[in-house]
Image (cartoon, rainbow, N blue to C red):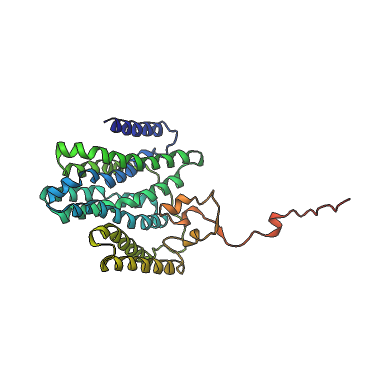
Amino acid sequence: MWILAGLTAAAVFVLRRLRRGRSRLPVGGGAPALLLAAFGVALAQTIVLAALTVFARELDVAATGATWLLTAFMRASAVATPVAGRLGDLFGHRRVIVTGLVLPAGSVVAALSTQLGSYSGTVTGRVLQGLSGGVFPCAFGLARQSVPAERLGGVVAALSAMFGVGGALGTVVAGPLVDVAGPAALFWLVATPALLALAGMDRVPTPSASAAPARRVALAGAALLTGALVALLLAISQGPAWGWSSPGISALFVTAVAQTAAFGFVERRVAAPLIDLRLLIGRACSPRTSPPSSWAWGCSPQSHSCRCSSRRPPHSATVSATPLPKPGS
C-alpha cells in the first residue's frame, strides 16, 4: 500500500509540475498526453506479471502457457520499437503515436477473451498491446522536436520516469485488482490511460517530419530484424522447457545469428536504413546533436541531425597557424 501511495504521489507531482509550465510543451500544453501515453504502455507491460497463476487457471493452460501473456507483449514491443522510430522520422512522431496507441483495442480483445476463457484471443490481445511499444521512441522524438532546449531535460526525465512508474504500478495493483474484480479488469485498467492520452493528443503540436532522401521504410531490414528478435526471444523463453541442447533451440539460435548477420549486411547497403549501424562501429558523433538514447530507443539518427565522420579534422582546424618561436629567440 505504501508503494502504491508513493508511486501515485510521484505521478501526480510530475503532472502538476508540467501543468504549471516548468517543463511543458510550448503549444497547447501537450506534455500530459505524452506522459499518459508512455505511462499506459509501461503499465500494460507488467500488468499481468503478478497474476499469471490466475490467468493459467482461468484460461485452463499450464504455467508455461500463461507466461506467453507476458512474452507476447515483449516480442511485439521489441519489433515495433525500431520500426515506429523510423516511421516517426518519416511521417511525424505525433501521427505514429496516435496510430500506435492501440492499447484500447488490444485491451478490449484481451478482456473479452479472458471472460470467454479463450487463451488464443487473450494472447492476440497482448500482441496488439505490445505493438504500442513504438509510442516510447516517438514520444522522445516528439518532445525533442517540440520542447525548447532549456526545458527538454525535464520532459525527457519525466518520460523516462513514466516507464519505471508505470511498470512498478502494474506489478503492485494487479494482485488486489484481480482479487476484487477478476483478471479481465486488468485489461480494462490498461485501456484507461490510453484513452485519456488519445483524447489529449489534439493538444500536442505537430512538427513537420524530418526531411529524408527517401520516404520509405527498409522493409527487408524490418523483416530480418523481426525474424532475428522473434527467434532469439523464443529460444530464450523456451530453452528451459525444451532443453538448451535440443534441436529446436539450437535451430532458433542459429536462425537468430544468421538473420542478425543478414540484417547488418542489408542495412549497410541501403540509402535509408532502419537503424544506422555506423553509430555502433566507432564513428565520431556530436554528443550535442545525437545522444546515445536516440538509437537506444530505436530512433533513426536522421531526425537527430547526426554528424558522423570517420575522417580526421583538417590540420588547420587543430593546429595554430602562428609558428612557434625558436629556442633562444
Residue 199 spot, x, y in % from top left: 29, 42
Instruction: Tell which of 253 and 288 is nearer to you.
Output: 253
* 146 sits left or right of 110 in the view: right
* 75 sits left or right of 187 in the view: right
* 88 sits left or right of 53 in the view: right
The residue positioned 19% from the left and 48% from the top of the image is: 108
Which image quarter is the N terminus in?
top left
Can you name the residue that lies furthest to the right here? 329
The residue positioned 34% from the left and 34% from the top of the image is: 11
Residue 140 spot, x, y in % from top left: 41, 47
On screen, residue 50 above or below 209: above
The residue positioned 23% from the left and 59% from the top of the image is: 241
Residue 236 spot, x, y in % from top left: 30, 58
Query: Total of numbered circles in the picture?
Result: 0
Q: Can residue 191 be seen in this view?
A: no
Instruction: Tell which of 307 and 121 is nearer to you.
Output: 121
Q: Quarter of the image holding residue 197? A: top left
Q: Is residue 308 visible?
A: yes
Residue 145 spot, x, y in % from top left: 45, 47
Q: Quarter of the image holding residue 189? A: top left
* 251 sits left or right of 88 in the view: left
On screen, residue 167 above or below 257: above
